[in-house]
Image (tube, rainbow, N blue to C red):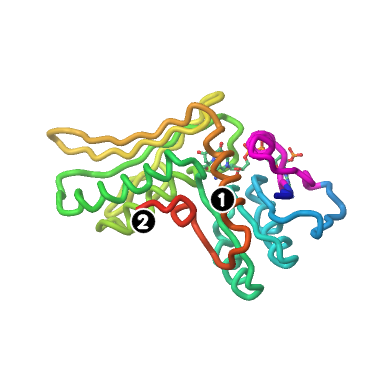
Amino acid sequence: MRIALFGYGRMGKMIEQAALNRNHTIVAKIDIDTKEIDFSSFDVAIDFSMPTAAYGNITKCLENNIPIISGTTGWLENYENAVALCKEKEGAFIYASNFSLGVNVFFELNEYLAKMMKSLKQYNVSMEEIHHTQKLDAPSGTAITLAEGVINNSDYTKWKLDESGTNQIPITAKRIEAVPGTHTVFYDSEIDSIEIKHTAHNREGFALGAVIAAEWIIGKKGIFTMKDVLNLG
Ligand SMILES: NC(=O)C1=CN([C@@H]2O[C@H](COP(=O)(O)OP(=O)(O)OC[C@H]3O[C@@H](n4cnc5c(N)ncnc54)[C@H](OP(=O)(O)O)[C@@H]3O)[C@@H](O)[C@H]2O)C=CC1
Ligand SMILES: O=C(O)C1=N[C@H](C(=O)O)C[C@H](O)C1
């Protein structure tokens, strides 16, 4: 498979390694200074760039009939526009806030737990995410997906950074040097606490998941998620 990388930072470099290990070729490394892109030279694009750049990169790929995998977080105000463009162009697109197998299992566990806890009103839910100090967005995309997983399976209706309130999930974002990504969902009552936690030990799982998604999307048309790719749930 011929892959173009949009963004060649921490994740772009990890994805390059994961792709080479699976016998793919990286034909382009595109950044903000790239003047011209030869869209005929690759089969699929993987975008791990920046919140301000992701939507533009996704748009370019869809307009040029290139399947696009995006892991960039912090651009979701434009997600529905990307979906509409993908439908209009009959393209192929996957966004995932987290491509690791472990986190996608954790997403399923989170939804299952939320369903069980729905009627247990003595418990209050909250979330914490911890990432490295270079991270640009807060809360993390993964924390937002976790909050949406609870909202879709409970009486909670919204999430907010650092703020609790009626039917609102408070999310705390901590920034600590070199942490790849740690997410915890807490249910607290006067009597006890339940917590589920995912800890990434490095970025390998994110990178491998993105390459697996790129392999999977070839020949498909539509808007998909990692749940489709991993056949979970
Ligand atoms: N979904 C998932 O599983 C995961 C998602 N992420 C997300 O991926 C994104 C990237 O993370 P990370 O690699 O750590 O960040 P980095 O800052 O290390 O890399 C981002 C890269 O994008 C480049 N860039 C800036 N503008 C553009 C543009 N217009 N087109 C293409 N590239 C551009 C930057 O270049 P320059 O430095 O020159 O500005 C930089 O090299 C983040 O949003 C992060 O949250 C991260 C890990 C896992
Ligand atoms: O910026 C990161 O590093 C990460 N970003 C993603 C997110 O916002 O959830 C995924 C992972 O936690 C690492």
Q: Which residue is mark 2?
A: 158
Q: Residue furthest top?
A: 177
Q: Does any atom of ligand 2 lie closer than 8 Å to the CB of label 2?
A: no
Instruction: Locate residue 202 relative to residue 67 in the image: left or right.
Output: left
Q: Is residue 22 magenta?
A: yes
The three-letter code of the residue at mark 2 reads: Lys
Q: Residue furthest right?
A: 35
* Residue 135 marker: none
Q: Is residue 143 magenta?
A: no
Measured in 3D between alpha carbons, the distance from the residue under mark 2 to the one under mark 1, in whole angstroms, is 29 Å
* Residue 213 marker: 1
Rendered location of residue 66, percent (x, y): 70, 61
Q: Few, some or many C-alpha atoms within 10 Å of disc 2 (few <14, some 14-19, many ≥20)?
A: some
The stretch of residues the image draws in magenta is 5-32
The three-letter code of the residue at mark 1 reads: Ala
Instruction: Locate residue 149 relative to residue 178 in the image: left or right.
Output: left
Indicate the quadrant of ligand 1 in the picture: top right
Query: Please, what secondary structure does the residue beneath circle 1 have?
Result: helix
Which one is in front in this view, the residue at disc 2 or the one at disc 1?
Answer: 1
